[in-house]
Each structure stands twice: as C-alpha cells, then as structure tokens.
Image: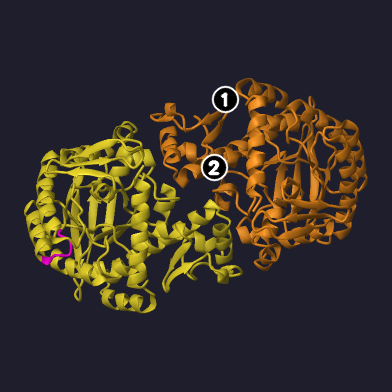
Chain colours: A orange, B yellow
Amino acid sequence: MDFTFELIKRDSQTTGRVGVMRTPHGEIPTPVFAPVGTQATVKTLSPHELADLGATLILANTYHLYLRPGAEIVAELGGLHRFMGWPGPILTDSGGFQVFSLQDLRRVGDEGVLFRSHLDGSEHFFSPEKVIQIQELLGADIILALDECPDPFDRDYNAAALQRTHRWAERCLAAHTRRDQALFGIVQGGIFPDLRRESARFLASLNFPGYAIGGLSVGESKETMNEMLEITVPLLPEDKPRHLLGVGSPEDLFEGVARGIDIFDCALPTRLARNGTVLTRKGRLNLRNAEFARDARPIEEGCGCYTCQHFSRAYLRHLIKAEEILGLRLSSLHNVYFMVHLMAEIRQSLQDGSFASRREEFLSEYQIVPYEVRRQNKEAWLARRRGSKTA
Amino acid sequence: MDFTFELIKRDSQTTGRVGVMRTPHGEIPTPVFAPVGTQATVKTLSPHELADLGATLILANTYHLYLRPGAEIVAELGGLHRFMGWPGPILTDSGGFQVFSLQDLRRVGDEGVLFRSHLDGSEHFFSPEKVIQIQELLGADIILALDECPDPFDRDYNAAALQRTHRWAERCLAAHTRRDQALFGIVQGGIFPDLRRESARFLASLNFPGYAIGGLSVGESKETMNEMLEITVPLLPEDKPRHLLGVGSPEDLFEGVARGIDIFDCALPTRLARNGTVLTRKGRLNLRNAEFARDARPIEEGCGCYTCQHFSRAYLRHLIKAEEILGLRLSSLHNVYFMVHLMAEIRQSLQDGSFASRREEFLSEYQIVPYEVRRQNKEAWLARRRGSKTA
C-alpha cells in the first residue's frame, strides 16, 4: 500500500487543518504528535504502553540505529517494526541533524559528510544515497532526505548549505527504491525569509509526498520560528503533510497547528521526565520539590493516564528522589500521554470549529517557560548532547 | 481479618509442603517466592506488571522506607499498599539485616542499635519497639522482629547476639498492637547447629504466627545452608509458615522447599537484570554477549512472559548495550516471572506428588553458578552495598 495523505477539513480562522496519513502500518490522524524513540525505544516505555496511550506514529533516529545495532542487523531481524515490537507507523530522520550536531564532524562536501561515531570514534560517511539505503534497511513508513543543518544565524553558511541540501534532496529522490516508504524533503534556510522561500519553492517543485521543516527551534525566538513557518508553509503544496522537526512544547503544538503544521515530534516529554518534571494544563511541575512530599493528588486531576489513575505525587516524588526507574517510567508515561492527548484535543477542536478558542483558553492557563530560561536549558542540553557525542 | 496459615498437603518423599496463608490483602498459596521491593517498588516494574506475572506477595525494606520517605509519610498516605499501588499482601523486614550490613554502624547494646543513615550520615536508633512501631505505620500484612545479624562464622559473637535476638523477639511481641498484621520471629545462630537448635526451640516457645530463618546465604556453602535448614525446620511448629530470608537462586527454591520452607524472597531476579543477565531453564544468559546480536529467539522458547512473547534476544541485547531503561524493565520482568512461575510449578508438583522427580529434572538441566564464582559475586555485591551505604 502506498502512502497517502487526505485533507479532511480546514479551520476557518487559522491555517490549521485536519487530515489522515495512510501508511502500510496504519492510519495516522493529523495533526499528530510523534514521541521520539531515538534508539528504537521511546525512553522507558514499552510499545504496548505507547499504543495504549494513543500514540499513532513514533520517530526513530537513523544516526543512532546505523551505529548501533546497525541497519543490516535491524533488517535481518525483520525491520524496525518487528525489531522494536511496534506494529504501527514509524518515521526515521535522515541522521543529518545528529551528524551536524557532532563536535567531531570531520568534513562536509558536496558528496556528503564525513564524521566520527560518538560511540567509538570510528569514521563514517553519510551521502544522500547512503542515508536512503540505511532507511530502506530500517524500513520505516516515512523517511527523510539528508539535509545540512547550519547555525541558523549564519547567512553565508545557510546560503551555501541550502544549495547542497537541495542537490541532496534530488539525489535522495533518485536513490529511493522502496515504494512502501514515503520520502519527505526538508526545507532549510535558517532565519532568513528569502532562503526559506527559495527552499520551500525548490522542494515543492520536486513533488515529495510530504515536507519536513528543519533548522527551527534551535536557538531562535518563538516569534522568529513562527515567522519562518508563516513564510514557508504557504509555499508548500496544500495536499501534502508538513512536519515541523523536533518541536515542541505544549504551546508549540497550538502555534504550529495554527500555521498549518500536521506532524510534530519531540523528545521533550521523556527528557523532562528524566529531570523529574511533568506536564500539566497549568505548566510544568518539578516533582522533586518538597511541597509534593505529602501530596496525595495525582499529577493532574482528571488525567486519564495510568500514572494519574494509580499514583500520588508523593509516591512519584519518593521514586524520583530514591532514583527508582519506576519514577522515570511513570513520569514519562504521563508526559507522553499529555502531549498525545493534547494533540487529540486540538484535532477535535479543529473538527468542531473551536480550535481558535481552545488555543486561547489553553494559552491563558498554561504557564510558558520564559524564553531566557528555555534558551539556557536548550543550550545546556545541546552542550551535553555534543559532549556525549564525543568518544 | 486475622492472619492464618493452612497446611494443605505434605510431600511424601521430602519435607516439602503445600499451604495457603490468608492475609487482610489476599491469599498467598505456598510455597511462595516474594519479589523484593526495597524502596516500595520492585525495581523497574509496575504493580500491575507484578500482579499480571502472578506475584502474590512482595517484600519491602523497613530500613529504607524509614529513612525515605519516612514511615509517617507512608502512613499519612494510607499505608504501604495504597502508597505503592499494590493491593496484594506485603511483608516488611525489620531493618536488622540492613542496619547490621552498614559499615557506619555505631553501637549495638541490649536496648537496640545505633546507626548512621547511608543517605546523609544522620544518627538513628532502632529498638525492638521502634521497628514494630515503624512497621505498624507502614502497615504490611506480615512483619518481622528485630534481630541481630552477626558474621555467621564467629561463634562467640553468634552466641552473644543470639541472646539479644531472643530478648528482642519477646519485646517485639509485647510491643506489637495491630491485630491485622502477623509478626514473625527470626531464628539466628550462624553456622552452629547447637545455636540454631537453641534459637528454633526458644522462638517456637513464643508462639509466633510464623517464623523466618535469618543469617543464611551470607557467605557459607550451600551444604552448610542446607544442613542448618535440616536442623532448624523440624524444631519449628509444623502448623506455622517458615520464611528463608534473602534466598535465593532457582536451585535454592527446590532445596529449600525440600527442607520445609514455605516463603522465599530475593532481589536476585532484578539485580541480575541490571547486569544484563537473564534466567532460563538451562542456567543464566548474559545478554551482553556478542553471540546474541542477531538472535531472533526470545530469552526462552515457550516462556509466557511479556518479554518473551514480544521481543528477541537481539533487541534486548541492543537495549542493554545502548543503556536503555526498557532493557532493564524487560529483563527484570522476565526474571521475576521466571522465579514466580518456577515456584508455581514446584507447588503444582507438590500437589500432584511429582516434586522429587521435578526437582531432579530441574537440577539436571539447570547449570548452577559454581560456588567460588557465586561467593565472589556475593562479596563484590556486599562490598558495593556497604559502599553505597556510607554517605
């Protein structure tokens, strides 16, 4: 079965829309939030928990799976779906974002990118053809073209990298052979409106079955990100799904949907859980805080997740303080449930015409993490990430 | 409802027996293997997973819960059952074993034991009355008397400690007020037959509703442990359950049951899982080994656990190598299932008269870890344990 995208309804007040992607491993109602399973596991969760909480699409990372356990091993074991026991739709990224985040990046050229593994320092080469071959071995339903991910504020680098990203997009299309996978192109261009326009127009001309928007949420302000979306989205074909890569926070779902985004993915829910932080309609809670020591309430009253149905904030705090894995599990489960269900509500509100008011209501209740705090968190995270990537 | 123990059947060829313990939180068919939930969680597993895999009794540690989150907090939140979301029977130990394993033990006297917390170095005092009070706050169905746990090879220390343990047993009985909890006495005496006999006779005279046997599996050989059981068990009342504390390995279940033990508890299944080791009918497997990299088989063919029903050795190996929590979860789940189901088989074989042949069959297939390796592992573990207990 080939990949299809059906547009079901357009919102009357925003650029938001409801649709459905059909893949060989099932249907994905859009807009959709995809939990991230970097190493063929959404951290701490079992595939059955993901299905139970309503996940319909998960993302796995080509860079990581290529290095460990290796794409051939995954293929030999029946492909990623069978390997990880997740029978539903999977999307793999191209590895571009990971490779370009490496400090030990060796050399970028028109042919591809030479890099060192963060695991053992061994040298590897990703070309457009190579990342398609790897993704064909992994066997995800949706795969991505190789793109170059420059510093979003460096105009000269962005202009040069964009040409390479466009040539690589053409080569990925030419190299792709599996008809049961949908290959999406990636729009780049940093924070530069003219480059974003050029990229969107060029990629649209290549007639991909879907489009990802990359190079955002990497240090620029929310306003800049939203502006880039407003520039990019209208230039992409309306009958193709649009994926905003690596985004985002609860509020980003509303802002992205309002600007025509259909697919989101982010490791935030599981990453926050590892710091003892959980999501609620009013904002984030840090369960390590002493105020929760005797708090018999669930993380959020009315939440239908397994964690909130069975455990108190006091017990979760105890588990987290005692460094018990069940604490990570239950926090991750709640956070992923929160994002998936928030998206389900957004979808429903688009269906019944209440999206704009739902968005306003949510944003009036939800305490957004201030930009400066967020920027520092992001930088600290990127630094740790780079640190852990050097052998 | 008061605690009762009903003896259902005696094995004709061994001292093994089938029974049922009835507690306010449910029935426990015996012999039983109780997974250990030190900090109010069986490491990595949810209470629903424990119920699904057939666990009927779990053990929690008084020492740990007293220090964190504190017994009053657990009581305020409705007691241990509600706190940890496990509605079934719970047993708490007295904290004696943990306190006497501390390197920073301050002073033991007739009144009790003064020690320093491994968490923050703060000073605490456990008396028999105090540990009963703590266990009444925690609210387990079965609780244990405070005992002194000496080096099993030191005769003078054992002789002196035994008198203290016996006085403490009397004081625990006198201090115990909750009629919905069964307080078990603990037989000590190291590796000395006369001391074991004296302890069993004395404690039997106090008419506890059940008896634990402590101070075994702490460095002595399997032969010595079995000899101590053969000396101790016949002196305990036949109509009371007998708990062999902190034991054991799969083969120990057969050896203990054959000598009249009804209750076992051990952290081994979850501890092994943290090292990437899983249990099979043929012995242990270390999933880190390269031979499993492309192994599409489950841990054990025919195993009914969630892990074996859904995942390959290759995937588990990948998760463990990649340090993913799901690897710990799935390995722990399999190992606990293995022990609980092995005990269910033992119980069934006692019922249908095939225990002796089932025991022979198991021991002929199961590769036991050699004594010397086991002793070294145990010492390394005790050393790490002591290390982690000093602030």
Q: Name the residue under label 2.
A: A333
Q: Is residue B390 left or right of residue B277?
A: left
User: Does residue B43 lie above or below A352 as drawn?
Assistant: below
Residue depicted at 19% across the width and 38% down the height: B130
- Point out the stretch of residues depicted in magenta: B189-193
Q: Mark 1 points at which residue?
A: A282
Q: Position of residue A130 (x, y in %)?
A: 80, 60
Residue A347 position by quadrant: top right
Q: Where is residue B331 in the image (x, y as percent from the top left)?
A: 48, 59
Neighbour class for label 1 at 10 Å: few (<14), some, many (≥20)? some
Question: Can residue A25 be found in the magenta stretch?
Answer: no
Q: Nearer the viewer, residue A182 or A127?
A: A127
Report the predominant secondary structure element of the magenta stretch. loop
Amino acid at pointer 2: Leu
Q: Position of residue B161 (x, y in %)?
A: 13, 52
Q: Nearer the viewer, residue B289 or A173?
A: B289
Q: Nearer the viewer, residue A224 or A26?
A: A224
Residue depicted at 91% across the width and 45% down the height: A163
Q: Which of A198 and A257 is in front in this view?
A: A198
Q: Is residue B359 left or right of residue B326?
A: left
Q: Position of residue A123 (x, y in %)?
A: 73, 60
Q: Disc 1 on helix, strand or loop?
A: loop
Residue depicted at 52% across the width and 39% down the height: A331
Task: State which chain disc 2 sits on.
Answer: A
Amino acid at pointer 1: Lys
Q: Can residue B1 be seen in this view?
A: no
Q: In this view, does A307 lie to the left or right of B148?
A: right
Task: State which chain disc 1 sits on.
Answer: A
Q: Which quadrant: the N terminus of chain B?
A: top left
Residue A346 position by quadrant: top right
Callouts 2 and 1 on one subunit: yes
